[in-house]
Image (tube, rainbow, N blue to C red):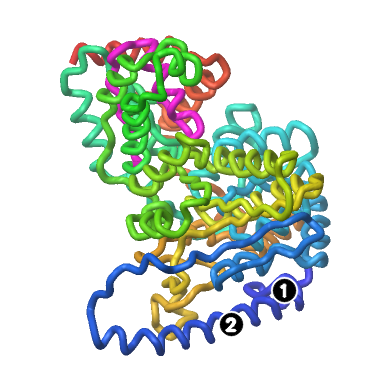
Amino acid sequence: MHRISSRGCVSVKHCLSKLNSNVERISFSSRYLASAIPRANNSIQSSPRYDEVFPSIVIGGKDQDLVPLGSFAEAQSQYMNPDPEIVASLSKSVKTANMGIVAHYYMDVELQSILNAVGGDRVAIADSLAMGDAAVRMVESGDVKAIACLGVDFMAESVQAILGRAGYGHIPVYRLDTRSIGCSLAESAERPAYRAWLQKRSREENPNGLLHVVYINTSLETKATASSTVPTITCTSSNVVKTMLQASAQQPGIRILYGPDTYMGENLVTFFDGICNSSEWSDEKIAEELHPSHNNETLRRLRDSIDVFPNGNCVVHHMFGSDVVENVRQNYSDAYVTAHLEVPGEMFEIAMEKSMVGMGTVGSTSDILKFISKKVSEAASSPSVTGRKRLKFILGTEAGMITSIVKSVQGILDLSKNSVEAEIIFPVATEAITAVDESDSAGLSIVPGVSGGEGCSTAGGCATCPFMKMNDIDKLSDVVEMVGSDSSHISLEKHLPPRRLHGKTLNGVSATELGVQPIIYMRQFMKESTIPDELMAKAQACSAS
């Protein structure tokens, strides 16, 4: 690889680009800090501003330049067209090292753009569950001898576990950082309060049985602990609704514990409540579009049986609060609104309202990508579109999604004869607060202004995950080089996923097996569309508390 230093840049052009970005950041930060000081002296609190225009990126066909509007959007679009030298170098190194790369949608724009350009069978960008499946396919289809996992620690754990269950436990999975790559949501389930909540609920009366539905974005240790306490099945944001519908269909009135994501749990209750209180949802429509065994009465029973853990959230989605929603309502009434299931209730409710009239969606990262692609495709092929048409989308999730959105939208518009554009709007403050490494900031832990990384503000959302951004192109290059050299086994060991369950047992059962079992139950459900009988028998047995 073309490298300036072990912590530097992949190429000279890359380094100059980073330097220019830092200069722009310092200039912007200085201007903002100067303007902020008088305000801080004059008043402690300021009224929320609902007249701010959110930053956005306008997407046309592949032969058209992206148009960033606002400093945050400029930071996101800066690396959309990666340096061919970097792409060629990484591609060659990955092949030489016989490696595969699985990355989450929330990687930063620079890294995703490079990976998209490398492409091929050795690279996959997906949600947390699909990352493991992609790793298995890579191993099965070629001579891949190692996997680089670009995400947080629990994702590397999950990928390693899925490889192991598929018979490929000898294939190592490497993280890009030797330090812990945490997750605020996953960590909320590792505290004693989560197990105490499960234990308390299991001791209460549950006449129709008890089932714990745990979000996949948790560690194997959390899943193992939960499995040893109550009957547990894993879910994703894509299948959680189907999981709850099926469980309550197989065992009417079953009590469902959901955690650790408090916002998602509350939003699920809101989702079912919205359907029950909507005149648009007849029993027939519910049976046809949601589940054949359900109607309004059974949905109300399901809604009332959901028990949500009260103290867990994702630091990214936590910031999509009331100020953001008020701005959306006042200034973006003509926009489609997308919201991940993990966002706070206010953001979820407006997306839910919009979804009722075809102007929004609530769901997973994959659901959001599919929705935007579908709407763009419909406009691109519609004979009624004359002149230039711009579709606006509020992106109610992590800003790293923009790379996959751009790739999909450009592919659609390249085949269209209509003059259609898509504007992706980031509901963040243009004057954001960026956390920085104290070693690079003269002792300051935050710097006012927008960088290519965070961009978080209590006034306007938190568009990027600081934990995911511990992954970058330089660290990926280092890991690939170490694997390719076959001479750095000791160093590579530090990049392996956490092994907190290694050799441990819970109630006489392997802790690793207990941690993987909820995932296996989920996979059986996804394959057969029914909750496994073994798990439902355990859930029903909990009625005798």
Q: Can you say whether 334 is above or below 132 in the image?
A: below
- In the rendered image, which quarter contains the N terminus? bottom right
- Residue 9 or 402: which is nearer the viewer? 402
Say what secondary structure mark 1 lies in: helix
For label 2, the residue is: 24
Reply yes or no: does residue 247 show up in magenta: yes
Residue 26, horizontal then vertical, whole percent: 53, 84
Q: Which residues are magenta?
A: 233-261
Query: Between tags 1 and 2, which lies in front?
Result: 2
Give how far across and how far down residue 479 sits, in percent.
Answer: 67, 58
Sequence-first tag of 1 and 2: 1
Residue beneath disc 1:
14
Going 77% across and 55% down the picture, which residue do you hit? 61
The residue depicted at 66 percent of the width and 72 percent of the height is 6
Tell me which amino acid carries mark 2.
Glu
**Amino acid on which the number 1 mark rests in the picture:** His
- At a point 65% along the width and 76% down the height, the residue shown is 18
- On screen, residue 40 versus residue 432, left or right, reads left
Q: Quadrant of the C terminus?
A: top left
Residue 487 lies, in percent from the top left, at: 72, 58
Camera-side residue of 69 and 485: 69
Other-residue count near label 1 (Cα within 10 Å), few / some / many at <14 / 14–19 / ≥20: some
Q: Is residue 259 magenta?
A: yes
Q: Residue at x 33, y 45 (%)?
A: 345
Mark 1 touching mark 2, by CB under 8 A? Answer: no
Question: Secondary structure beneath disc 2?
Answer: helix
* Distance in Å between CA atoms under marks 1 and 2: 16 Å
Say whether residue 448 is left or right of residue 374: left
Percent from the top left, x then y, of residue 232?
A: 37, 25
Front residue of 244 and 339: 339
User: Which numbered tag is attached to residue 226?
Assistant: none
